[in-house]
């Protein structure tokens, strides 16, 4: 396995405070250097990604961890917007959600999610899943260098 010289920028789009804390804990325990950015709803995620509404200095993430069930703009709309954007479509979007519904799985892949993972209910298993995500997407996979999106007027 290669050494992770680069700092991984990860955007977590999640409205559940407990899942946010578990994800933070998992990344803090990981051997990789990472910056975890949080958006608590779909609108905040899109503002972050498109560098608008107070996010003009936001760093383009290497990976997006996306919950589907969000207040306001839901995760499906966020996923669709990312994958339709020429500037953002290459960012891996990992759907990390509690839904096991076939409809949600199929729709996520139809919208070009890079993978779909059901959140374990057990905290220890959840931390293990998050660490496995990071192991795979940061240590094994080669990710494209993505230029930051230009600030919106």
Image: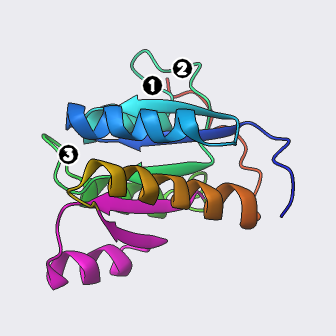
Residue 73: mark in rendering: 3
Residue 56: mark in rendering: 2
x then y, percent, for residue 136: 63, 65
Q: Residues within 10 Å of mark 2 (few under 14, many from 20)?
A: some
Residue at point 38%, 56% (across, down): 81
93 is within the stretch colored magenta:
yes
Q: Provide the residue designation for mark 1.
A: 52
Answer whether labels 2 and 1 touch (C-beta < 8 Å): yes
Q: Determine which quarter of the picture holds residue 44.
A: top left
x then y, percent, for residue 98: 19, 61
Q: Earlier in the sequence, mark 3 or mark 2?
A: 2
The stretch of residues the image draws in magenta is 91-118
x then y, percent, for residue 1: 83, 64
Q: Tell me if 3 is positioned left or right of 10 in this view.
A: right
- Find the residue positioned furthest to the front: 124
Residue at point 16%, 53% (across, down): 69
């Amino acid at each position: 396995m290669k050494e992770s010289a680069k700092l991984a920028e990860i955007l977590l789009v999640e409205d559940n405070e407990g899942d946010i804390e578990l994800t933070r804990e998992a990344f803090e325990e990981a051997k990789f250097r990472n910056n975890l950015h949080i958006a608590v709803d779909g609108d905040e995620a899109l503002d972050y990604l498109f560098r608008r509404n107070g996010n003009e200095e936001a760093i383009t993430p290497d990976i997006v961890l996306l919950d589907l069930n969000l207040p306001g703009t839901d995760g499906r709309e966020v996923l669709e917007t990312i994958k339709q954007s020429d500037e953002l479509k290459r960012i891996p979007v990992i759907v990390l959600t509690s839904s096991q519904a076939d409809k949600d799985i199929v729709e996520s892949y139809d919208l070009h999610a890079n993978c779909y993972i059901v959140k374990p209910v057990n905290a220890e298993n959840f931390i293990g899943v998050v660490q496995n995500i990071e192991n795979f997407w940061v240590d094994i996979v080669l990710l494209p260098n993505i230029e930051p999106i230009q600030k919106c007027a």
